[in-house]
Image: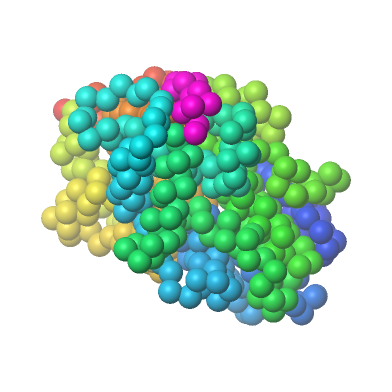
Amino acid sequence: MEETIQVTKQQKNCITFQPEGDLLVRGIPGSGKTTVLLERARYLQMKQNDSVLFMAYNKSLTAYIRQISLKSDSKPVEATTFHQWGLRLVKEISLSHTHYIGDRKEDVVRHAYHTVLKRNEPLDFPKISDDDTRNSKLIQFLSDEISWIKGNGLTEWARYADKPRIGRGNQIKVSKQNRYAIFSVFEKYNELLKSYQYKSIDYDDVALLIDQYFHKVSKDQRPAHILIDEAQDLTAMQLKVIAKLARTSLTIGADKGQQIYHRNFAWKDVGIDVIGRSKFLNETFRSTQEIIRLAKDFQKRDVLLLKDEDYTETVLPSASGQIPVLVESNNLDAEVNTISKLVKRYLLNFPDDTIGIIGYSNRRLSKFSETLDEHKVPWVMIKEDETNMLLPGVKLVSYYSAKGLEFDHVIVANLKKGCLPYKKSPPGMDEEDFLATERRKFFVAMTRAKYTLTISAVRTYSPFIDELNPSLYKKITIK
Ligand SMILES: Nc1ncnc2c1ncn2[C@@H]1O[C@H](COP(=O)(O)OP(=O)(O)OP(=O)(O)O)[C@@H](O)[C@H]1O
């Protein structure tokens, strides 16, 4: 977002939409949702002279938004994630000494499970086949189920008991007795979290606690205007409290086609009124025709999305460029070597450009960083910190953290079977739903590219490679 841009009429209508009530801005990748939300934040800040808060799903996107916002002359916009902002509020209104349980959540679920098993009452858990004697799949299932319960605000037995299991798949059969057993673990888990031993909350608790202690939230603690980007990945409960917290207006940016967590709710279910207050941006500005043509064709494999009432076809942009390249390597070592050489060439030819290497995880990306060091290529890892994303050079970023970002040149790496899509779906999730979210990660990664796109496949290739239309890319095989 280097140049000053001329917003379109469609975008302007969103920016200056009436500053009271809700507004939903939907749009295809690169259609300017972030740009519009940021401009609207500035507009509201200036016109209304009242507090404005910009929220986004992950820390890398909020850091990026702060960086873009700082580049302009106007007052910077406060940007944060719901989890960061919410935890601060929770500490102020109820639990001053709390922190997130983070990666230890499954340990607490296991602790709760073993505690309820010792009770003198028969508990019937869902049958999940597992070779592991530690019941890891059941524990993971219980952990995901607890997130689902909290994310949908089903924290009372009466609400959970009969709730249709939308979004929880049909793979594992869950009877009423099973629900009773699960709910016993849920209650014990919450008790343990609060106990002296853990004194923690989990990520899903933030929305529940704000809802529970809403009467304690003062007017000054509630922003007048809240703008939220990438809202398709928030839970129903998170959106419900965000809608309650916004005093005057709530602006939501979302694209179902980029939803990488399995969610299922309608806007009205969470108290958001979008009737007559929904806008769609269908022009795309980031990428070239060649990149969007390939990504758009691939998106057609997402049958769940095509059936969704929110789905709208991506329109081709006017800018034209190089055809995307598919590089095939025999193994991961060959992949990092080839990509490192390619990156070196880009740096030489385009010293003022950003180059994003998007990989499966930070662990996988560390292989790139080692090899880039050997090739004497400077790089930065975009994790969740304040790495400057606007400066030229090489950025390493995971599929998750790449959401909402953009780079002049993108290399989507690790297209290997078992890596993307990941080798196994979480217990309980339907294979089709799982593949749809994994496919969207690839779609999101491809659409981060402005000028060139390279896809790097490693033997045994990801099945997604076969889903790419071969007439829309050029193939290079590295021996
Ligand atoms: N009217 C416009 N004219 C030219 N460029 C634009 C315009 N609107 C947005 N852009 C540029 O297009 C790119 C994509 O914009 P932005 O990131 O806001 O899209 P987005 O819809 O949020 O994308 P995504 O959902 O894929 O993350 C940015 O570089 C932005 O500066």
- Residue farthest toward the left in the current orientation of the protein: 374
Please state the extent of the stretch shown in magenta in the rendering.
170-180
- On the picture, is 383 further left or further right than 1? left
- Residue farthest toward the front in the current orientation of the protein: 120
Q: Residue at x 30, y 28 (%)?
A: 423
- On the picture, is 388 further left or further right than 77? left
**In magenta segment, residue 146:** no
Q: Residue at x 31, y 40 (%)?
A: 118
Q: Residue at x 46, y 28 (%)?
A: 178
The foreground one among 182 and 15 is: 182
Q: Position of residue 182 (x, y in %)?
A: 45, 36
User: Can you tell which quarter of the image residue 199 is in?
Assistant: bottom left
Q: Position of residue 72 (x, y in %)?
A: 60, 74
**In magenta segment, residue 178:** yes
Image vertical order of residue 247 relative to residue 454, above or below = below
Q: Position of residue 74 (x, y in %)?
A: 65, 78
User: Can you tell which quarter of the image residue 389 is in?
Assistant: bottom left
Q: Is residue 250 shown to the viewer in this render? A: yes
Q: Residue at x 30, y 56 (%)?
A: 348
